[in-house]
Amino acid sequence: MKLRHPYPIIILISAICLLLFPSLTSGQTCQRTCGNQILKYPFGSDPGCGDPRFQQYVTCDQQKLILTTHTGSYPVTNIDYSNQVIYISDPSMSTCSCTQPSKGFGLDWDAPFTFHDDTIFALLDCSVTSSPIYTLDGLYTDGNNSKIPLCDNEGTPICSFLSNCRPISTINLPISTCCIYTPVDFGPSFEMDLKKLQCSSYSGFYSFNGQETIPENWKYGIALKYKFNVNNDYPSSCARCERGYGVCGYTGAYNSFICNCRNGVNMSTDCFFTASYNNGLRLFPSKNGIIP
Ligand SMILES: *[C@@H]1O[C@H](CO)[C@@H](O)[C@H](O)[C@H]1NC(C)=O
Ligand SMILES: *[C@@H]1O[C@H](CO)[C@@H](O)[C@H](O)[C@H]1NC(C)=O
């Protein structure tokens, strides 16, 4: 008897296996890491993951976590989940090792972030003749149309330390054209618009790293704070979801909470039910992928 072609049988067996073990076919949509950065609520790797308010600003692009604002895209260098701080770098920012022109940095007015108090900006190489920092018709005026200084006088020592950095000293920066600008002065537009301010570059850092006089060792970048909600409570539904190795996400027109489980199934509560089911039984998710 002629042996019949074995492939159809193999395909049939594979199909049965895939039906019995859906975890082999559907992986977890929402990733728990992006590159080497751990992802937890409120951040998410993909649309539908994390908190919808954050998803449009922080995305995982080819294993790189990126914060996007109207001024550009910025790599996320670290997330401090316990203190709710996200750290970003700006490739156009000047540091002690390089100076370069920049347009500045701004947060979108509706972004769920605020500047962390530790963030200090130094505006560099501002035009003494035309910058509103130095002219009387400044950007910020009180009722008398008199100038409110934008630069923080307490910051003058920071400018003199920065001017010791070789690249900053070689642009021959008079110390008077360095201005320490604290985020609290950003004004209603949440924006450091260097074109408007007539400055050619800026530097930003969030820590002296214990060495206030050595700008080489400062931690350059921008620290932003975030809140979960008005009361800043970690949502209990999400905490429960994460305990079962799920990832918090949202779905539908009302951004309803979902827990994205390891086998790819979405639950409206947590993953403990799917975990116990995983050893052979088949779950049939409803049309929108949610099991109540
Ligand atoms: C205007 O100037 C006067 C005198 O310099 C000052 O007392 C007053 O507080 C100023 N008004 C405002 C709105 O700042
Ligand atoms: C589960 O939710 C995620 C995020 O909302 C979505 O991308 C995915 O398609 C859903 N999975 C299923 C099986 O519906």
Image: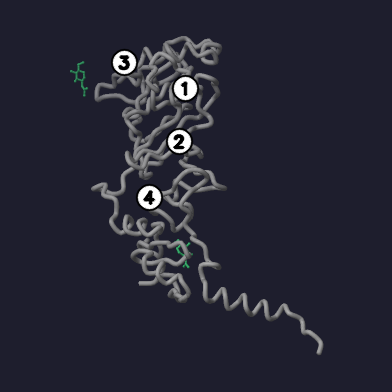
Which mark's residue is nearer the viewer, 2 or 3? 2
Estimate the x, y position of residue 5 in percent, counting from the top left.
76, 81
Tell me the crowding category of disc 3: few under 14, some 14 to 19, or many 20 or more residues within 10 angstroms, Cα based: few
| Disc 1, SS | loop
Residue at mark 4: 42
Mark 4 and mark 1: Cα distance apart in space: 37 Å
Quadrant of the rendering where the N terminus is positioned: bottom right
Quadrant location of residue 149? Answer: top left
Residue receiving disc 2: 88
Q: Mark 4 or 2 closer to N-term?
A: 4
C-alpha gap between disc 4 and disc 2? 16 Å
**Which three-letter amino acid code belongs to the residue tagged 1?**
Gln
The 10 Å Cα crowd at callout 1, few under 14, some 14 to 19, many 20 or more, is many
Q: CA distance from mark 1 to mark 2?
A: 24 Å
What's the residue type where badge 3 is placed? Glu
N-terminal label among 4 and 3: 4
| Residue wearing tag 1 | 198
